[in-house]
Image (cartoon, helix red, strand yellow):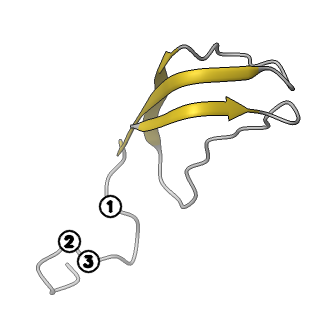
Amino acid sequence: MVRSGRLRFTEKPRTAVRFPGTGERVSTSHSDRTRLPDKVTPGREYRDTTVAYHLATRLTGGPEGGRNDGDGTGA
């Protein structure tokens, strides 16, 4: 969670969520905001804000070729 007493954006934020690496996955993310809109206005001052960011991802496929199964045998 992030809290601020006073916050001002000088320009419109550019955001992105990326999951580098290989393998199929299912992912989700969202934020819970207090006194901060989803689309902020550059130059406007926001006071006493909080943002809680939630992110979850999980692999949906089996092990990739050439990787071991965790027991050290490689099988």
Residue 11 occupies quadrant: top right
Circles 1 and 2: CB atoms closer than 8 Å: yes
Image location of residue 71, percent across then percent down: 11, 79
Image location of residue 68, percent across then percent down: 26, 77
Residue at label 1?
A: 63
Image location of residue 50, percent across then percent down: 46, 27
Residue under the image location 17 percent in, 75 percent down: 70
Please indicate whether residue 62 sits to the left or right of residue 33 in the image: left
Residue at label 3?
A: 68
Residue at label 2?
A: 69
Q: Give whichever of 33, 35 is nearer the camera.
A: 35
Residue under the image location 54 percent in, 61 percent down: 21
Marks 1/2: CA–CA distance: 7 Å
Crowd around label 3: few <14 · some 14–19 · many ≥20 (10 Å): few
Residue type for callout 3: Asn
Marks 2/3: CA–CA distance: 4 Å
Residue under the image location 32 percent in, 61 percent down: 63
Residue type for callout 2: Asp
